[in-house]
Every structure is written in structure tokens, then in C-alpha cells.
Image (cartoon, coloured by chain):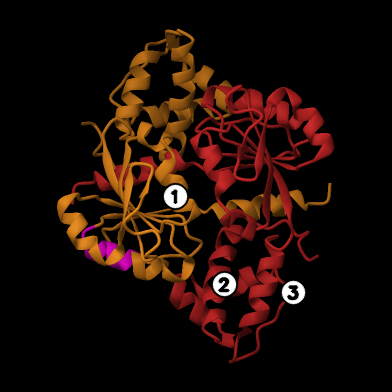
Chain colours: A orange, B red
Amino acid sequence: MVNHVILPEPTLRRLPWYLAYVEILKARNVEYVSSTQISRALNVDASQIAKDLSFLSLKGKTRIGYEVAALVDTLAEFLGFTTTHKAFVFGAGSLGKALMQDSGLSIYGLEIVAGFDIDPQKTGTRVGDVPIYHIDTLAEVMQQSPATIGILTVPAECAQDTADIAIGEGIRAIWNFTPYRVKVAEGIVMANTSIYAHLALIYNRLSAPV
Amino acid sequence: MVNHVILPEPTLRRLPWYLAYVEILKARNVEYVSSTQISRALNVDASQIAKDLSFLSLKGKTRIGYEVAALVDTLAEFLGFTTTHKAFVFGAGSLGKALMQDSGLSIYGLEIVAGFDIDPQKTGTRVGDVPIYHIDTLAEVMQQSPATIGILTVPAECAQDTADIAIGEGIRAIWNFTPYRVKVAEGIVMANTSIYAHLALIYNRLSAPV
């Protein structure tokens, strides 16, 4: 495991771009890639790329660059995509169900082991392979089939309470898809995927006078 | 329409938080809210909130604050959530299908009118209410049922080509869910929802030595 360096957020945003790009090169049987090449393809400064990649214990060769296959493997492992991380989804509404059915997430190391809701029409059912439980049974489920990541897709008005309950039962990271700004104690990992903020950004830029 | 001010990205990220919060207050029949109150609830500096809200043509009253109902309406309209914006989804894989079935997006003004794929098993079918067409028929579909936003959920290796085709047929904004860093010409709106980068962030922070 190389993944115990706390990386800056901008680096963590860029590394998956490099991975996606070198995976394409690998599929095309390209053997070596230089940071200049990655730079041209992705519009990122070459020195920035070299700096980002320096966090990995992988050296490029002068003039030849990085070995593509090794770069793919090292990046995927370094980013945690080759390890399985267990997660619960809180809220089995349309977005929650969508995430439970998105098989793409497992490629990136995320295994959704259970969903939680309060709607009796939903609890006791399954979404794909994922069983849906009542939130009141969280402690039990956590004991039988523990998870570290809690994915929040509940209505905004329940976001804070649900996060508090999840953390109280041992969830250590909250991935928040709600538009509500959830507060967590220090030591709890928090990531916001602000779908609505991105929509607002698109609408705002589209409305710009040309 | 008030929505022709080009807002800074951080403001556009925070305004949906305020909206989610004041919507909760409105549901609880709260009449007025001050920026200090929003500040305490969301952990955002009160002067920052006042500054962000100053982009809206809405004044708070001294000591009483903002009228909650008016703030909800103004924010929702200002962010473009009360106007319908038409979108195509490119790639009817698990994430693409999930977005087509996520009824939550329509609440925020996004109407997905068609999906595109190249798989003959998918083209000609529907996902929920959304018809799936072959990408080769994009020009026709665009003429009959135009859209301005293209949501990219294709495999990373097709992301750039698909974006180029979409923009060539008149798409003006790309909402990129792929891990590939797509390049677009100036004047084309680009928003990245980096699901994989957020996963990488969570994994990295979770692996931190306690």
C-alpha cells in the first residue's frame, strides 16, 4: 500500500484524469508516455503533471517518459480504486437507487452493501443486489455487514440528522449528494458532489450574453 | 429574468446551499432569516453570505433579515431552477440510465429529452420516458426536439469524440460525468462532475493515519 500520503485536493482531482488518459493509451498498446504528451492531451501544465506524479513512487525515464502499463497500475492502486471500500446508501429515492444500480462504481473500488430508508414500501426490498433496510436497524446491519462510507441521497431536510445517525453508528466518511451543507466533526471525511451547483453553473454560463 | 449576471464559481457553489436551507425553514413556516442564522446553520461566514446574496435583487431588513418565502423564490429563479433546460444524455450505460430515471433533476429545471448510444440493443428502446437513439441520428433529433445541454456518460475513450459531435450539432454546454478531461472551444460551457475524483478523495482521507 502506497496510499497513506495525504494529497492536496487539486492533485486528487487531476490524478484520475491522468489515469483515464493512460488507460486509453494502454488499450491502444502505447508503451511510453511523457508528461509533455499528457499535458497536450489534457490541457494541464507539464510541470504540474510531473509534480502530481511525483507523489507516486514511480520515476519516468529521461526522454522516454513513463511506462504506460506501470503508470495505469500505480495510479489505480494509489487512488484506492483497486481496494474494495464498503458503503451504505442513505435514501432509496431515485438518485439513491440509481447509485445502487450503477455498476461503474465497483470498478472504482466502491461496493454498496446496503441501502437505508424509512418508507415501509421500500424497506425489505432490494434494488439490484442491494438490500434496503429501515434506518432503525442500522446498528444491527453495521454489525453484520460493516461499511465505512455513507452515501447521502436523502431529502435535504433529513441530511444532517441522517449523517449524525450514520456517524454515530461508525460511518467514517460522508459522500453528500444532497444540496444541504452537512456539518461533521473533525476526523470524519466529507465529500460533496454538488449536482445542483453544477446545474446552476451551467444555467448561469448559458445565460451569459454572447 | 434576473439571471444574466456571470457569477463567480464559489458563489454558484454556495447559493444552492442557502436555497436548500431556506426551503427547510419555509416548510417549517419560518418567516424571516438573517445571514447570521444561515451562517450558524451552514458554517459559512456571515459577511460572505451577505455578499453572495447581494447578487440577487433582494434586500434584507435590518435586524429582521430576509423574508424566507421571497428568498426561496428569488434564489430558485436566480439559479435557473424554475426554467426548463433541455438536455441529451450521451451514453445509455448504468450512469446514463440512472440520470434519465432520476426524477430529482427535473425539480432543478433539467429536462432530459433524449438519450444516445451506439449499441443496437439500446437504440430504439426507452429508459423511463426517455427515447434512446443512435448517435448517427443526432442531427435529426436535434432538429425535431432540440436541446442545449449534453450530459456525457460514455466510456472515457469516447468522451472527447462524443463531445465534439454534440457541439458540432449545436449543443452549447457539456456536463461531463466521465473521468476524461474533455477539451472544448471557447464559448462552450463545461462542467465536470468528478465522481471518481471524489471517491479518490474519500479513500485518500480515510487511509490517513489517525
Element assignment for label 1: helix
Q: Residue furthest bottom?
A: B63
Looking at the picture, which amino acid does disc 3 mark? Ser
Find the distance from the CA under tag 3 to the CA under tag 1: 38 Å
What amino acid does circle 2 point to? Ile
Range shown magenta: A163-170
Question: Residue at position x 39%, y 58% from top?
Answer: A122
Residue tagged by mark 1? Answer: A97
Q: Secondary structure at mark 2?
A: helix
Label 1 amino acid? Lys
Q: What residue is pinned by disc 2?
A: B49
The answer to whether one can see residue A51 in this image is yes
Residue A168 colored in magenta in the image:
yes
Q: Nearer the viewer, residue A101 or A88?
A: A101
Query: What percent of the width, then of the height, locates residue A10?
Result: 45, 42
In front of the other: A159 or A94:
A94
Residue where numbered disc 3 is placed = B57
Q: Quadrant of the N terminus of chain B?
A: bottom right
